[in-house]
Amino acid sequence: MTPSPTSAGALAGVRILDMATVLAAPMGATLCADHGADVVKLELPDGSDALRGLQPVKDGVPLWWKVANRGKRGITLDVRRPRGREIFLSMLPRFDVLVENFRSGTLDRWGLDIETLHRANPRLVVLRLTGFGQTGPYKARPGYARIFEAMSGFTNLTGEFGGPPLHSNFPVGDAVAGLFCAFSIAAEVARLRGDPEAKGVEVDLAATEALFRLLDCLPVEHEMLGQVRRPEGNRASYTAPSNIYRSRDGQFFSLVASSNAIFARLCGAIGEPALADDPRFATNPARVKNLVELDNHLGAWFAAHDYATIATRLEEAGIPFSKAYTIEDIEQDPHYIARGAIVRLPDADYGSLPAPCVVPRIVGREMPVPRTGPAVGEHNGEVYGELGIGAAELERLKDEGVV
C-alpha cells in the first residue's frame, strides 16, 4: 500500500484485484473504488460475466455493468490456462486484496489455493464471498441473492399476513453482502496499515450470514419469548403505528409514529387528540397489541383525504412520513437535488450516465466522480504493460485465448 494524500479517499493507495462475477463481491470492490482504491476488474476474455446480460441493457450495451463496476480498470485473463495462471501469480505482488466469489474449492482446482496465493504475496488479503461460506455441508452450493435472502430468514419477514413470503424486485442480498465485503476489506486494510510485518489472511464471507447478521433480534426473540416472527404486510409487529397507507387520491405513503410523543402529535394532526389517551393506544405495547384496530382507524382517515392535505398536516406536526418514491420522484425531489445525490459518471458510449453518489460523504473532502465500468479488456495494454508485457506478446496471448 502506498501513502495517500489527505485530499484523496481513505482507501487511496490500496490496490484491489476483483476477479468476482455478477454483483455482490464486485459491489464491495466498487464501494472501495468510490473511496479511492485502485481496483482492477479481471474478466474472462469472452466477457461472459452474467451481469453484462442483466437488464437494463440498451442496444446491447450493459448499463447495469457500467454503473455497478464504476471506477475500475478492466483486464481479461483466463487463469485456468497455464500461461494465464502464471501471469496471474506474477500480478499478485502488486495488489493488496484479491476478491473472488467462485464456488468453494474452485481456485484450488485451478492451482490457485491459498498457500500458492500467499507464496506469491504473503500480505495479500484474499476475500472469498460465496453464498454459504468455505465450510459446512452447503459450501459447494451455488449462491444467488434470492436463495440466501430466503435461507437467512430475511424473506420470511416480507409479505402479507397469512400469504407467501415476498422477494423485493432488487437483489437486496447481493447489496448487503457487498457492504460486508467492503467493510471486510477496509477492516483488513486498517490492520495491515498498522503493522508492516502483518501477514495476509483469507476472509470467508458468506452472503447468507451477512443477511442473517442484520436480523439481530430473531434468535433472542425465539429463545426468550418463544416467538417466530412472520410476515405482517406493511405493518411492523414490534412498533405501532408503522405502516403504508393510501390517500383518497391513490398515493401510497409510509408513516412511523411509534413513540408516545409522536403518536400524540399524529392524533392531533388528524383532529383526534383524545385518541392518544385511549388505553388501547396510550403506549407502544398497547398499540402493538391493538395494531389492527389502530391501523384500520388511521387508514380510514387517510383514505378520506387527499395526499396534499395529509402531507401538510403531517409535516406541520413533525410526523416521520414519506410517499413511496419511484425513481422519478427521487430525480425531482428538492432534497436529493440539493445534496447532489445523483451524479453523472463519464462514459465512453453515452457521454455520461446517472448513478447514486459516493456514500458516505466526508466533510471537507471533495471526492472525484468515477467513470463507468470498463469495456471487456479495456485496460489490458495499460495493466499488462506494467508487468513488462508488450503489445506483440499481448496480441499473441489474445490469439491463444489467454487474454
Image (cartoon, rainbow, N blue to C red):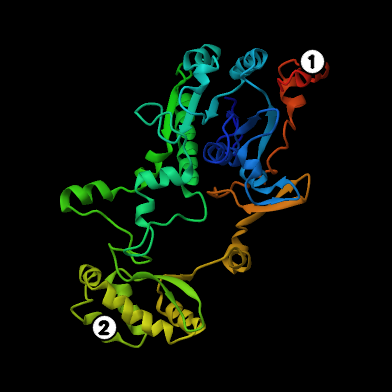
In the image, residue 354 lies at what x, y percent? 67, 54
In the image, residue 398 lies at what x, y percent? 76, 21
User: Which residue is drawn at the image coordinates 69% and 33% (left, top)?
Assistant: 47
Depth check: give the residue in front, 132 or 263. Answer: 132
In the picture, measured across the screen, residue 102 lies left or right of residue 393, that is: left
Q: Is residue 187 above or below residue 277?
A: above
User: Would you call the spot at circle 1 few (<14 residues within 10 Å), some (14-19), or many (20 or more)?
Assistant: few
Q: Residue furthest right?
A: 392
In the image, residue 89 lies at what x, y percent? 60, 15
Examine the image and state in which quarter residue 402 appears: top right
The disc label shown at residue 275, or none: 2
Examine the image and state in which quarter residue 332 appears: bottom right
User: Which residue is drawn at the image coordinates 64% and 16% (left, top)?
Assistant: 81
Which marked residue is nearer to the observer: mark 2 or mark 1? 1
Examine the image and state in which quarter residue 263 appears: bottom left
Depth check: give the residue in front, 327 or 155. Answer: 155
Q: Is residue 69 in sight in this rendering?
A: no
In the picture, measured across the screen, residue 167 lies left or right of residue 375, that is: left
Q: Is residue 348 in sight in this rendering?
A: yes
Q: Earlier in the sequence, mark 2 or mark 1?
A: 2
The disc label shown at residue 353, or none: none
In the picture, measured across the screen, residue 286 lies left or right of residue 84, that is: left
Residue type, numbered disc 1:
Glu
Q: Is residue 313 above or below residue 224?
A: below
Residue under numbered circle 1: 393
Q: Is residue 36 above or below residue 220?
A: above
Residue type, numbered disc 2:
Leu
Label 2 and label 1: CA atoms lie apart by: 79 Å
In the image, residue 389 lies at what x, y percent? 75, 16
